[in-house]
């Protein structure tokens, strides 16, 4: 099945200069990149992204981690598209716990568990179609994605826009 998935190279990945390594590993999937950007993660975005984890004991640390509190305050967000994109990307990422992840997976190679107990596992990838849709729509606007992956509509707003001077 053709599908799409949200990938985040987390702040530890950027801080450790792993962007190239991670993208090279992901290129093994032969999937298409249909959106990409470097983004600052606000508290609001972090909490929305990880809203399912709200009741976990490590939630506050997780929010600080994804916001870049311990590293660089940025993430790289990408959308990969193609045959079994969700499954193929998850496979290369490896298990959530970097100590348990296959040693040749991205998380197995580059992740660590901090003294505060957070799994700094370098990369986020959506786990299923529903999660991918929610996450892609959270991180990207339709005009930032070069393919029509979800239906869109036009809406009138009187919002002020920020433009080059
Ligand atoms: P996933 O990223 O493999 O989908 P989730 O269960 O969705 O795993 O957890 C989101 C993130 O929360 C993980 O990537 C990891 O950074 C962190 N995390 C998950 N479980 C634990 C845990 O038991 N201890 C510490 N951090 C965790
Ligand atoms: Mg998850």
Image: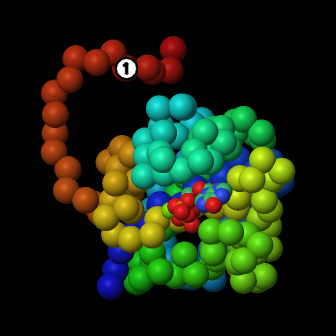
Q: Secondary structure at mark 1?
A: loop
| Whether residue 74 can be seen here | no
In-front residue for pair 95/106: 95
| Whether residue 29 can be seen here | yes
x and y, in percent, of residue 5 in the image: 44, 66
Residue at the (46%, 65%) spot, across then down: 126
Residue at the (54%, 50%) spot, across then down: 56
Chosen colour scheme? rainbow
Quadrant location of the N terminus in the rendered image: bottom left
x and y, in percent, of residue 38 in the image: 60, 44
In-front residue for pair 38/69: 69
Left or right: 96, with 20 as reference point: left
Residue 97, quarter of the rendered image? bottom right
Residue 106, quarter of the rendered image? bottom right
In-front residue for pair 163/106: 106
Residue at label 1?
A: 161
x and y, in percent, of residue 60 in the image: 61, 39
Residue 129, quarter of the rendered image? bottom left
Left or right: 122, with 163 as reference point: right
Q: Is residue 74 above or below residue 108?
A: above
Is the C-beta of the residue carrying label 1 under 8 Å from the nearest atom of ligand 2? no
Q: Is residue 135 above or below residue 160?
A: below
In-front residue for pair 28/10: 10
Residue at the (50%, 77%) spot, across then down: 31
Left or right: 22, with 87 as reference point: right
Neighbour class for label 1 at 10 Å: few (<14), some, many (≥20)? few
Q: Is residue 134 above or below residue 165?
A: below
x and y, in percent, of residue 138 in the image: 39, 46
- How many labels were placed on the picture? 1
């Amino acid at each position: 099945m053709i599908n799409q998935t949200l990938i985040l190279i987390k702040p530890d990945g950027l801080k450790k200069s792993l962007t190239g390594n991670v993208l090279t590993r992901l290129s093994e999937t032969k999937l298409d990149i249909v959106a990409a950007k470097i983004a600052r993660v606000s508290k609001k975005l972090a909490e929305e992204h990880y809203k399912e984890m709200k009741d976990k004991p490590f939630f506050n640390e997780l929010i600080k981690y994804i916001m870049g509190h311990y590293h660089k305050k940025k993430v790289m967000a990408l959308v990969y598209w193609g045959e079994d994109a969700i499954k193929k990307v998850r496979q290369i990422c490896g298990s959530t716990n970097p100590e348990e992840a296959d040693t040749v997976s991205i998380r197995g190679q580059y992740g660590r568990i901090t003294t505060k107990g957070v799994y700094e596992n370098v990369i986020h990838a959506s786990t299923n179609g529903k999660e991918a849709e929610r996450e892609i729509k959270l991180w990207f606007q339709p005009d930032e994605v070069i393919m029509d992956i979800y239906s869109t509509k036009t809406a009138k707003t009187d919002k002020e826009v920020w433009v080059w001077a």
